[in-house]
Image (tube, rainbow, N blue to C red):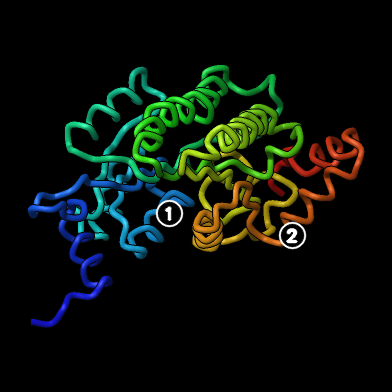
Amino acid sequence: MKEESARERADRRTHRGTGPERPGGRPGPDRRALVTGASSGIGAAFVRALRARGERVVLVARREDRLRRLAQFFGGEPGALAISLDLTRPGAGAWLEAELQARGVEVDLLVNNAGVGVTGPFQNQPIGRLLAMVDLNVRALTDLTRRFLPPMIARGGGRIINVVSNAAFQPVPYLGVYAATKAFVLSFTEALATELRRTGVKVQALCPGLTETEFRELAGMDLLAGRKVRGMSPDDVVALSLAALDRGKLRVIPGWSNRVIATAERLVPGAVVRRMAAELFRPRPER
């Protein structure tokens, strides 16, 4: 009989939905990548890229119809498990943790991608929408990281990608709360990476700039001065992220222009940076 290649063994495991066999033929743990905000944009791009790499995935998002269509595109279970869940709902993190434990799923890669934004004068924004943004961008990310990190440390390996934004590098008038939540995520991620240096767990802060997703419209950025400027494709952002994760790189800023801007902002007085950001993000009426 022809000896099975390593690639063939990996493909067989991917389609079976259980982990590598242990001695005696018993199935190993079902280790998967968990992607939040998986129904569109960067989240959906992560799902596509991870499935192409042969990883089994858990897709989490609020929009059940989109989520299930994406999971079905990849053949559904055992390769792609869809879970419709509003992460701002009280107890959502605990419920998700218990659901995955009941299914025998171990999270080997956590992609905290779910996030929302809103553009406009702070005093005009609905209080409920602002607080929901803080809840999703900060609390839910912290909650999931705290729940799924300890098993990674116990296993001696794992991966966490927190999707930040280039808005984290400076205050952004008219996008102030969103930028502040992303500044939290960047600081938290880099601090956590230092804590985890000798644990075998890789941590990444992915800081994309303008990206061609529906986030721009949902956040009201279609009324900004630079609304016609094209961003990077989410697939390109994710490809750079995963390549950097393999190398163990902590802070990832996709796109040379975004890296240049991030560097320049450190050299320019803060007041100038804030005024420039205000001009860029001040909403303008459609003409």
Circle 2/circle 1 CB separation < 8 Å: no
Where is residue 109? Give x, y as percent. Answer: 39, 45
Q: Is residue 249 left or right of residue 94?
A: right
Q: In the displayed image of the protein, which residue is found farthest to the bottom?
A: 2
Where is residue 254? Give x, y as percent. Answer: 63, 57
Tell me if residue 145 comes above or below residue 72 in the rendering.
above
Which residue corresponds to mark 1? 46
Quadrant of the image occupied by residue 181: top right
Residue type, label 1: Phe
Image quarter hosting the N terminus: bottom left
Tell me if residue 4 comes above or below residue 79 in the rendering.
below
Q: Is residue 193 left or right of residue 151?
A: right
**Residue at horizontal 73 percent and vertical 52 percent from the top:** 226
Label 1 sits on a secondary structure element that is helix
Which of the two discs, 2 and 1, labels the residue nearer the N terminus?
Answer: 1
Nearest the camera: 146 or 81?
Answer: 146
Q: Is residue 193 left or right of residue 146?
A: right
The disc placed on residue 225 is: none
Label 2 sits on a secondary structure element that is helix
Where is residue 235? Give x, y as percent. Answer: 49, 61
Q: Is residue 117 visible?
A: no
Residue type, label 2: Ser
Q: Is residue 278 visible?
A: yes
Quadrant of the image occupied by residue 173: top right
Could you tell me how far apart the alpha carbons at marks 2 and 1 are, in whole angstroms?
22 Å
**Residue at horizontal 55 percent and vertical 45 percent from the top:** 204
Question: Is the residue marked by circle 2 packed among few (<14), some (14-19), or many (20+) residues within 10 Å?
Answer: few
**Residue at horizontal 58 percent and vertical 43 percent from the top:** 205
Quadrant of the image occupied by residue 107: top left
Which residue corresponds to mark 2? 257
